Amino acid sequence: MKIYGRAQDNESELVLLSESTLVADPNTLRELASFLYRCADNIEDLGEAWEHDHFENIDAISPRLVVFNPLVVEAISDD
């Protein structure tokens, strides 16, 4: 697993993170867990046909969370 991120003051640069911290209430964590399970199911069921998905959160201040299929990343980097 790799975790990438962008700084709030410089969203143009994508960097590999060594650590990530979530601050969230139990309901949001459960929603996130459900989202991650759906992404895992889609990768298993659809393979390279499924590329990515965005976690939707109703919080006013919430970072974007995108899950990307590693099979697609490997296919792109092999080209």
Image (cartoon, helix red, strand yellow):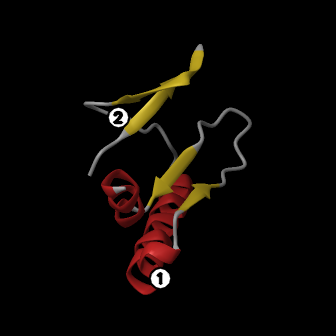
Name the quarter where the C terminus is drawn. Answer: bottom left
Percent coordinates x, y for residue 66 in the rendering? 53, 50
Query: What element does badge 2 sit on?
Result: loop
Residue 53, image quadrant = bottom right
Percent coordinates x, y for residue 78 in the rendering? 31, 56
Q: Mark 1 near mark 2, Cβ–Cβ under 8 Å? A: no
Residue at the front extreme, as displayed: 79
Asked if residue 20 can be seen in this view, the reply is yes
Residue type, label 1 = Leu
Per the image, the residue denoted by label 1 is 46
Q: Nearer the viewer, residue 57 or 72?
A: 72
Percent coordinates x, y for residue 65 in the rendering? 54, 46
Q: Nearer the viewer, residue 46 or 33?
A: 46
Residue at the image position 66 percent from the left and 54 percent from the top? 56
Q: Circle 2: is it few (<14), some (14-19), or many (20+) Cα within 10 Å? A: few
Residue at the image position 51 percent from the left and 76 percent from the top? 49
The vertical placement of 39 against 8, above or below, is: below
Q: Which one is closest to the eye, mark 1 or mark 2? A: 1
Residue at the bottom extreme, as displayed: 45
